[in-house]
Amino acid sequence: MQTAPCLSVTDAAALVGVSPRHLRRLAAAGVVPASRLGRRGWRRFDRRAVSRIARRLKAGV
């Protein structure tokens, strides 16, 4: 089974272990790269980038 390369705010936040609101703040600050889609500006997060951020946060870096 292949996983999707992009994650929603909710899925990415769960992977990192933060709230969706906090993840949006991290994206706005440029800590987590995000893409905006459509007229509403839905954010999508690259699964690999989110995994790297999650590892860094869990390691305390």
Image (cartoon, rainbow, N blue to C red):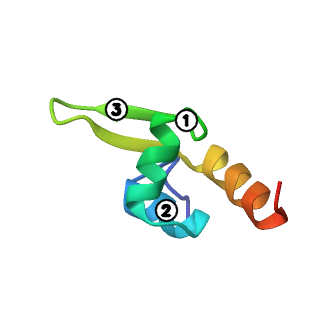
C-alpha distance separating marks 2 and 1: 13 Å
Residue at 78% x, 55% y: name it. Answer: 56
Residue 14 x %, y %: 50, 69
Q: Name the residue at 58% across, 41% down.
A: 32
Residue 3 spot, x, y in % from top left: 53, 58
**What residue would you read off at disc 3?**
36
Q: Which residue is mark 1?
A: 33
Give the alpha-carbon distance from disc 3 to disc 2, as whole Å. 16 Å
**Category of crowding for the residue at label 1, using alpha-carbon neighbours closer than 10 angstroms: few (below 14), some (14–19), many (at least 20):** some
| Element marked by disc 2 | helix
Mark positioned earlier in the residue sequence (2 or 1): 2
- Secondary structure beneath dot 1 equals loop
- Foreground residue among 22 and 40: 22
Question: Is 31 displayed left or right of 58 in the figure?
Answer: left
The three-letter code of the residue at mark 1 reads Pro
Most distant residue in the left direction: 39
Kind of element beneath mark 3: strand
Quadrant (top left/top right/bottom left/bottom right) for the C terminus: bottom right
Q: Which mark is residue 13?
A: 2
Give residue 40's position: percent from left, percent from top.
17, 36
Mark-to-mark CA distance, 1 and 3: 10 Å
Q: Are marks 2 and 1 in contact (CB under 8 Å)?
A: no
Q: Are marks 3 and 2 in contact (CB under 8 Å)?
A: no
Query: Residue at position x 58%, y 50% from top?
Result: 47
Q: Amino acid at mark 2?
A: Ala
